[in-house]
Amino acid sequence: MIKFGTGGWRAVIGDEFTKSNIQLLAKAVSSKMKAEGVNEKGIVIGYDRRFLAKEAMQWSAQVFAAEGIKAYLVNKSSPTPLIMYYVMKHEFAYGMMVTASHNPSLYNGIKVFTAGGRDADEIQTAEIEKYIGEIKPGEVNEMDYAEGLEKGLIEEIYPLNEYLDNIIAAVNMDAIRKANLKVAIDPMYGVSETSLTTILHTARCEVISIHDRHDTLFGGKLPSPSASTLRALQNTVIDNNCDIGLATDGDADRIGVVDDTGRFLHPNDILVLLYYYLVKFKGWKGPVVRNIATTHMLDKVAVSFGETCYEVPVGFKHISAKMNEVDAVIGGESSGGLTVRGHIKGKDGVYAAALLVEMIAVTGKKLSDIYKDIEAECGSIFMEERDYKFNQEKKDAIFHVLMEEKQLPELPVEIDHVSYLDGSKIYFKNGGWVIARFSGTEPLLRIFCEMPALEEAKEICRIYEEFLGL
């Protein structure tokens, strides 16, 4: 059975990610579109550089064509945010992207987007799963790909320029041109290289690229920008005296940043920097939205501006929905995804990268200096993060303790309150917090703790490990 998580449907290639399951999903989406009367417009589908991604896109299109629904296929590997932008701009009811985002290379998957270019929410994905369950053997038909092209039920498009022009129009390119910046980029063997270099060269930046070739194994590493995966980018920034290093995950919806000193910036820091920049230097007004496992430093910055920080469950659909509701300036999560008011309703690492370069140009300051300014104004807070793998038996036991019996460890800090909105999150009276929750995209238990001192955060994580027998 195909099951959606917080980032779409993801599965191991050759296990559950198979042609039959891909086409089963396409059949379910086509049935949903017909039931809702939105099949006449058609659907747009893209793919990234993962193994079988292009073929999966084409196999999906053959089912849509057989159902009489036109499939617009982005015929080169492209960023996920490009597909979201195209769905929004051209008012499609649905779109799909073949990607497993930042998962290991043995995974692939499909993200489904709804009207406005939004990630399909739990209601939408539950309905798709219901349609899948109703499909009987032999009901999934496909049209020959060449026949689909000939009949106009499959059309190959490549709207990259339209997407890039939208970003270029939203960024202060004149300021960047005058700054003479040197930028290192690491697409992590993913799909952002063309987009990033086009924008940066247009802004007259000197660009140094690494890991830009097509490699379905992602160089043997996880295609997720982190302190452990971006060491080569750190060295490139230091060796070439770059102003900034920019990385994106496999499908370019998440961003990783190395500052001018070669230090990896946690995604939390990036969110804080951009919110601070947009309000203080660009004069934007409004709140900020973060998920339940993202830094409360955003709360401190919001308070300093007389604004509010809103907390939502993990899953970017919750971020975008809340942003839309409260007209937030920016929203994001500690895994590296963010978006800004007026752009698409989902994560975009390419746009975030362009904004960070603009920030350096406009402020005339190094990233390291800007963050020091923020800490001077708002104070500091320190986070510790830990991931744990488990088998199903261990998962059931942990879930029983945390979410059913609602047990808590003995902690050395006074508790203010506890939330079970998404996992078990303890809020302390000193402003710190700790959360234990299961990942929605990988078989992991994640513990995040943020405290006034790093040693305090580490100690609370240690106590949680002992309490859960990890």
Image (cartoon, rainbow, N blue to C red):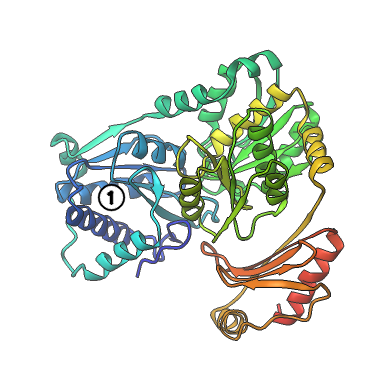
Identify the residue at image location x=34%, y=35%: 75
Whole-percent x, y for residue 450 in the image: 75, 60
Q: Is residue 307 visible?
A: yes
Up-down: is 176 above or below 253? above
Identify the residue at image location x=78%, y=29%: 366
Q: Which residue in the structure is indicated by mark 1?
A: 59
Up-down: is 338 above or below 384? above
- Neighbour class for label 1 at 10 Å: few (<14), some, many (≥20)? many
Does residue 379 appear to the left or right of 102 in the view shown? Answer: right
Does residue 393 appear to the left or right of 346 in the view shown? Answer: right
Identify the residue at image location x=62%, y=49%: 308
- SS assignment at label 1: helix
Q: Foreground: 423 or 245?
A: 423
Q: Farthest residue toward the front?
A: 306
Identify the residue at image location x=71%, y=45%: 301
Q: Would you identify the image quadrant in which residue 362 lies? A: top right
Whole-percent x, y for residue 65 in the image: 18, 46
Q: Amino acid at mark 1?
A: Trp
Whole-percent x, y for residue 395 in the image: 57, 79
User: Total number of numbered labels?
Assistant: 1
Does residue 93 appear to the left or right of 12 in the view shown? Answer: left
Quadrant position of the N terminus in the picture: bottom left
Q: Is residue 223 visible?
A: no
Up-down: is 228 above or below 429? above
Q: Would you identify the image quadrant in which residue 36 lies? A: bottom left
Quadrant position of the C terminus in the picture: bottom right
Q: Foreground: 37 or 398?
A: 37
Q: Foreground: 358 or 282?
A: 282
Up-down: is 417 above or below 297? below
